[in-house]
Amino acid sequence: MVFFRSVTAFTRLRSRVGQQSSLSNSVRWIQMQSSTDMDLKSQLQELIPEQQDRLKKLKSEHGKVQLGNITVDMVIGGMRGMTGLLWETSLLDPEEGIRFRGLSIPECQKVLPAAQSGGEPLPEGLLWLLLTGKVPSKEQVEALSKDLASRAAVPDYVYNAIDALPSTAHPMTQFANGVMALQVQSEFQKAYENGIHKSKFWEPTYEDCLNLIARVPVVAAYVYRRMYKNGDSIPSDKSLDYGANFSHMLGFDDDKMKELMRLYITIHSDHEGGNVSAHTGHLVGSALSDPYLSFAAALNGLAGPLHGLANQEVLLWIKSVVEECGENISKDQLKEYVWKTLNSGKVVPGYGHGVLRKTDPRYVCQREFALKHLPDDPLFQLVSKLYEVVPPVLTELGKVKNPWPNVDAHSGVLLNHYGLTEARYYTVLFGVSRSLGICSQLIWDRALGLALERPKSVTMDWLDAVCKKASSA
Ligand code: NMX
Ligand code: MLT
């Protein structure tokens, strides 16, 4: 296997895929693929020893290098800015946004295989990239697509577990319950009980993760049809790719909705390791809980309104604006509505971020999708108006570190346009997508033998004592 770790190599890739625009200098792991390397697992088998050695070397040669100081603010402020996690699949720059294995979203849109020329990336390609650091060929993506389709059977007891809940239960509760029921089939748990050697942990983890990624759209679609379509489930169509099949099982066969779903799953998949869902998945997995247990825990974090549930909150909030003021609301009226929201002690959903300090590139690419496919949609126009009105108001508030929109500010109006109008369901879509990122990292967690997560906590007494000592020194 030959790896190219230079800009030159990436330039070569660029010309191979016929791209014109400037691509990232930070890309490291790009490999010129031969179309015979179809098996994702054997690719990982080759990569893992190399990465294990790399980590071992980092530890032995640089283990004591300091990465920053921990302040009291960080300890009481949700660990903001504290570097404390290894997360290989993506990295977030506050100004620029997310890069998946070194590739920005526009770069992924250019180089990852699409269902049709110039279309949105196939999520299977993104999964391949997250796992291997390499841009897959169309053939590799097709092979992975088929592999996932062959793993997608969901046992009846999973549906029964969901059916045990009232159909009014929040969709995230039903979804997480379904994922917990999938755990019964965990290969990792079985292997662990049978005494598997730790050097092999990654293999049943890989099987669980691929099975989980394959099955979550089926479970998610079941929840949707149960709640909103009288339980009239639609069987999967194995001839379709992952995103298109999910859209199909939900009941949306419009080609543009399928494109939207591919984009949606791609961009929501991963956002480095510190966000609540990814961090939770990693933390729970660090106890050697299997991928189903880890991912179900992650979903419960995603279900919070400051995290993934914000996409539901955004559409409900936008609809409340329309209900109160109509679709053609003026910017002044909108400003007043934003202030009313803030003055009632609520946040403006879809704005702000724990790390980002600019408009989220995931917002930008959804805006571009809307400009291309639904420029006249009244709710899209309202979202555009909000982009002008909200940031100055949040800036005026004086305490918000990032007044710009995040991913959730845009996704709802796109789904709503194509008929997926049930806002309470939106976080489930986010969850399906996030399985790609969290599971990819879980495989690497086990392959690299990453440690049990156990940070130190302190009390206010402890902080008082340390601060007193510091100020008298
Ligand atoms: N509307 C009103 N107030 C806000 C907002 C907002 N959109 N964003 C931040 N603030 C407030 C925040 O509540 C805090 O107030 P206080 O000191 O009274 O507690 C203050 O500004 C400082 O917060 P920041 O340091 O700017 O933000 P932080 O890192 O603590 O929180 C979020 C980040 C994302 C939780 C926050 O911006 C927020 O609540 N946004 C709205 C909810 C949202 O869109 N969440 C989705 C995030 C993306 N995702 O999918 O997970
Ligand atoms: C995410 O996608 O996880 C959110 O943007 C939140 C975060 O990164 O903290």
Image: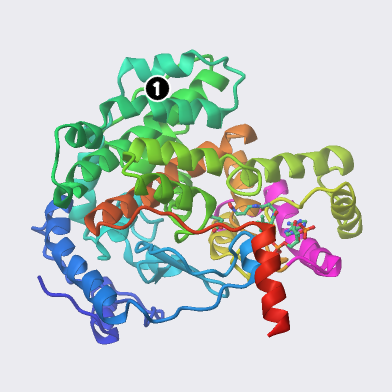
Residue displayed at 36% across by 61% down: 89
Q: Nearer the viewer, residue 293 or 319?
A: 293
From the image, give the main secondary structure of the stretch colored magenta: helix
- Residue 376 among those drawn in magenta: yes
The secondary structure type at the circle numbered 1 is: loop
Q: Quadrant of the N terminus?
A: bottom left
Q: Quadrant of ligand 2?
A: bottom right
The residue under label 1 is: 234
Q: Is residue 287 above or below residue 273?
A: above
Regarding residue 436, the answer to whether it shows in the image is: yes
The answer to whether any part of residue 116 appears in the image is no
State the image coordinates of residue 225 (x, y, percent, origin top left). Answer: 49, 22
Q: Nearer the viewer, residue 364 or 373?
A: 364
| Residue 345, placed above or below residue 168 | below
Q: Quadrant of the C terminus?
A: bottom right
Residue at 71% x, 66% y is: 464
194 horizontally vs 346: left or right: left
Q: Position of residue 34 (x, y in %)?
A: 11, 65
State whether residue 172 is above or below residue 225: below
Q: Residue at x 20, y 47 (%)?
A: 201
Is 457 or 168 nearer to us in this picture?
A: 457
Start and end of the magenta stretch? Answer: 372-400
